[in-house]
Image (cartoon, rainbow, N blue to C red):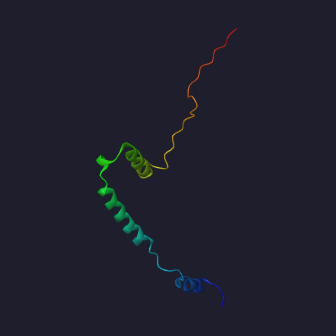
Amino acid sequence: MPFNSETATQAGSKSRRGKSIATEVRSQITEVAEELIKAIDIASLSDKDKVLYLKAIMPFILSKNERIETNQMPTEFQIEIIK
């Protein structure tokens, strides 16, 4: 049997891959996480626990794609000629 567009369509329709349950599991984990976050009484935490809590949630708050350049080249400069 030659491989052409018709046989390719037939072969592509037969998937051996199982059904993805990742979206269902992800939604359940999200619900559990939201309930746990709501249950935490932040006012009762110690200062150390507050810092650890902040450290844990910061990656979800801040954008990971944002870059801050610390070594910026000066845009203006002045040259003096001394004789």
- Quarter of the image holding residue 79? top right
Relative image position of residue 57 (x, y in whole percent) = 41, 51
Q: Is residue 61 visible?
A: no
Which residue is the extreme one toward the top? 83
- Residue drawn where x is 39% and y is 66% of the image: 29
Relative image position of residue 14 (x, y in whole percent) = 53, 85
Q: Is residue 49 left or right of residue 71?
A: left
Q: Is residue 72 visible?
A: yes
Q: Which is nearer the eye, 28 or 19?
A: 28
- Residue drawn where x is 63% and y is 15% of the image: 80
If the image is split into quadrants, where does the C terminus sit? top right
- Residue drawn where x is 45% and y is 49% of the image: 63
Relative image position of residue 45 (x, y in whole percent) = 33, 47
Which residue is the extreme one toward the bottom? 1
Q: Which is nearer the eye, 65 or 38?
A: 38
Q: Is residue 46 left or right of residue 16?
A: left
Residue 55 higher or lower than 81, as above or below: below
- Residue drawn where x is 65% and y is 91% of the image: 1
Q: Count the marks: how many? A: 0
Q: Is residue 62 left or right of residue 81?
A: left
Relative image position of residue 2 (x, y in whole percent) = 66, 88
Residue 62 higher or lower than 81, as above or below: below
Q: Which is nearer the eye, 31 or 48?
A: 48
